[in-house]
Image (cartoon, grey):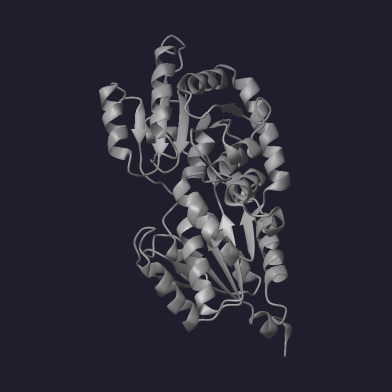
Amino acid sequence: MSEISLQSNRRLTMAITELDIGGAEKAFVRIAQGLKRLDWDVRVISLREDGPLSESLRDSGIAVTALNAGGFLDVRAIWRMRRELKRYPADVLLTFLHQANIAGRIAGRLAGVKRIICGIRVADRRLSVVLPERMTARLVDRYVAVSHTVADVHCSICGITSQLMSVIPNGVDIDAIRNTPAADRSTLGYGSNDRVILCVGRLSNQKSPLDVLRAFHELKNHWSNSGHPIRLLFVGEGPLRSELERQVSERSLCDVVQISGWRSDVWSLMKAADVFVLASRWEGLPNVVLEAMASGLPVVASAVDGCKELIEDGVTGRLFPAGDIQQLAQCLRETLDSSVEAEQRASVALRRIEADCRWENTIHQFHQLLLQTAPAAMP
């Protein structure tokens, strides 16, 4: 039997809560596509609907099944996943995100999957997450965390031995970002003299876009005599959009704040902006910060979990305590005021990203982990 036909017997099912646009979801897709190229027979299960990212998976020759289940309490996800795993047996089941992790480990054992690996993308300390994690931990063969901080916190709060945990950071499309041209500011209504603050992410409580708006309002009050108008651009959708729009109007910021929804040209926007801001209350290893750093864009981010691994305050970016509006505004002001220093930090960040954070490395590490974890009888 040829080597290729042997490799095609590596049956991998990957499951995720949903395939909507998001950092974890986009990383999941890149990993699935990369493993497919390494001759894993990859199938994907989405607990909820297909989602917009399903198409790119199918275009890569990866079968996608949507279970159309609801939220975490919808136990139909377990039985529907079990049925799918019985229909298409897998040597290894790799799951991403909390609901898929819990449903996957139960369904996988019921279906007789020999090896189950759970991907931990954030250090979620909520009791509603910790309890089911603890209760089902014995069903997991291996965990893989997106950062060392996430790994340490998850092991600590969920009672998991560190010997069961691996760390594989996300990658970033460095070459593609380098070759992406900057967006034309005039198409956004910005002048060459404007200072543009870019915030990309889901408009949700986790990402704290309202904190960004409040800090911008504070910053604007101290910026009127600078000679450089400041602008704030939100890229993303989510449950806080209507509240964000209401506060933009209430604070009379409609002429300087835009909420664009999701856009496909985020890298171009990064190339055209002056500073990137992320105010999240928790993060694993945020892709959007990696992309901003790879774009050469100065970054201001909250000092939470994965952000602290990516950013060395004052060296590769600026960090502020999550929820501290005054400190966020101060970091933004200092970054815009001291453009030379900000550009120097961005250059250091770019060099570090180029050395350590390529997708090829991430996919190779997943490939090796799967080979080490897979049943011994598998080719």
Q: Quadrant of residue 109?
A: bottom right
Name the residue nearer the viewer: 18 or 336.
Answer: 18
Name the residue nearer the viewer: 304 or 286.
Answer: 304
Left or right: 233, with 170 as reference point: left
Q: Residue at x 52, y 20 (%)?
A: 327
Left or right: 163, with 326 as reference point: right
Q: In the rendered view of the protein, which quadrant contains the C terminus?
A: bottom right
Residue 183 position, x and y percent, is 47, 39
State the count of labels.
Answer: 0
As drawn, 170 above or below 217: below
Q: In the rendered view of the protein, which quadrant contains the N terminus?
A: bottom right
Name the residue nearer the viewer: 371 or 34.
Answer: 371
Q: Residue at x 64, y 21 (%)?
A: 340
Residue 281 position, x and y percent, is 48, 36
Q: Residue at x 39, y 65 (%)?
A: 50
Q: Quadrant of residue 347?
A: top right
Residue 316 visible at all: yes
